[in-house]
Amino acid sequence: MNIIITGASKGIGKAIAKAYAAEGEVLLLCARHEAALESTRAELQQLYPSCRVYVTTADLSVRSDTVAFANWCLQFGVPDILVNNAGWFLPGSVHDEADGNLEKMIDTNLYSAYHLTRALLPAMLQDKPLNGARHIFNICSIASLHAYPNGGAYSISKYALMGFSKNLREELKPMGIKVTSVYPGAVMTDSWGDYDNSEGRIMEAADIAAMILAAGKLSPQAVVEDIVMRPILGDL
Ligand code: NAP
């Protein structure tokens, strides 16, 4: 299967890529910075020689880059799975966060998924897929589900991504493509800076990947609409 994962050079995206690489799939990955992306490609290819990993740089907050990435993906054939994961987190509050934060967050966290999905859907809808294999995962957040202190523009952008994901689910119901909204709580990635997780307070990126892989393996007539995951001790 052709699996497209955005923002896959590190964190949750990389963990999802690793899980699909272990299954021997064809991976099409992007991120903005080439060195980390190439290092991820080399690592996955070495760990799982039977998979095929292709990477290209793209800044998905820029629409022309998003369209170029979609066209690059399509040269490998019809996408089976799309994971809209690329995202940017900056804490802040509506009343005093920097001017422009909302625009930047919407560009990266919402428009990337919206425009990439629109560019890929015509191909994904070809041959009216009936085997249930075609699937779109949107990596939202618990910040899509409720407001919290210091959520600000990030939380607003993730609420919007949830709105996108839910509309897509309704639209694609009769078209044979599954849509799953994923709402992780805290996951140990670079987004958490130098947070000390030695006591395992927050989740591992591999936990999110495991749920996504499991959701993709159901019968054609079953779809997991929402995946909500939190650390066992709850939100921080
Ligand atoms: P991360 O470790 O910072 O990784 C983000 C990935 O996205 C990197 O590969 C990054 O590479 C790429 N990226 C960022 N901006 C991009 C852009 N404009 N165009 C293309 N690629 C871009 O983040 P993460 O914690 O794994 O988060 C992944 C997703 O999960 C995000 O949507 C985030 O909102 C969501 N999430 C995270 C948590 C958490 O606690 N970690 C919780 C809930 C939801 P480059 O910098 O090279 O572009």
Image (tube, rainbow, N blue to C red):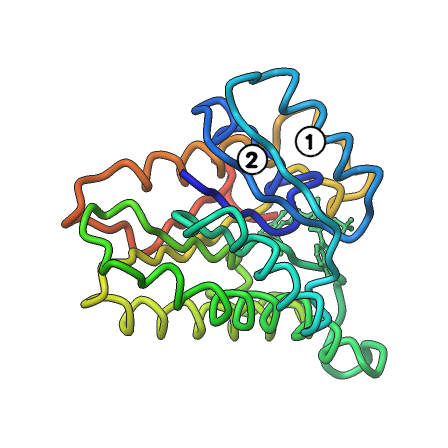
Q: How many numbered marks have been drawn onto this rendered protein structure?
A: 2
Location of residue 114 in the rendering, given as x and y in whole percent from the top left corner: 52, 71
Q: Nearer the viewer, residue 170 or 192?
A: 170
The residue shown at (66%, 49%) is: 7
Residue 206 location, quadrant: top right
Compared with residue 120, is residue 73 higher up or lower down, i.e. above or below? above
Confirm if mark 2 falls within 8 A of ligand 1.
no
Is residue 130 shown left or right of residue 156?
Answer: left
Location of residue 122 in the rendering, given as x and y in whole percent from the top left corner: 39, 68
Location of residue 142 in the rendering, given as x and y in whole percent from the top left corner: 51, 57
Q: Nearer the viewer, residue 32 or 167?
A: 32
How far apart are the two marked residues, 1 and 2, measured between alpha carbons?
9 Å
Is residue 2 shown left or right of residue 166?
Answer: right
The label on residue 70 is none
Compared with residue 160, is residue 218 higher up or lower down, i.e. above or below? above
Q: Earlier in the sequence, mark 1 or mark 2?
A: 2
The answer to whether residue 150 of the structure is visible from this angle is: no
Q: Nearer the viewer, residue 74 or 205?
A: 74
Compared with residue 232, is residue 43 higher up or lower down, i.e. above or below? above
The residue shown at (39%, 48%) is: 80
Crowding around mark 2 (Cα neighbors within 10 Å: few <14, some 14 to 19, many 20+) is: many
Location of residue 138 in the rendering, given as x and y in whole percent from the top left corner: 47, 57
Query: Circle 2 sits in a helix, a strand or a loop, which is it?
Result: helix
Query: Circle 1 sits in a helix, a strand or a loop, which is it?
Result: helix
The label on residue 17 is 2
Q: Quadrant of the N terminus?
A: top left
The residue shown at (60%, 42%) is: 13
* Amino acid on which the number 2 mark rests in the picture: Ala
- Label 1 vs label 2, nearer the camera: 1
* Amino acid on which the number 1 mark rests in the picture: Arg
The label on residue 41 is 1
Q: Nearer the viewer, residue 76 or 29?
A: 76
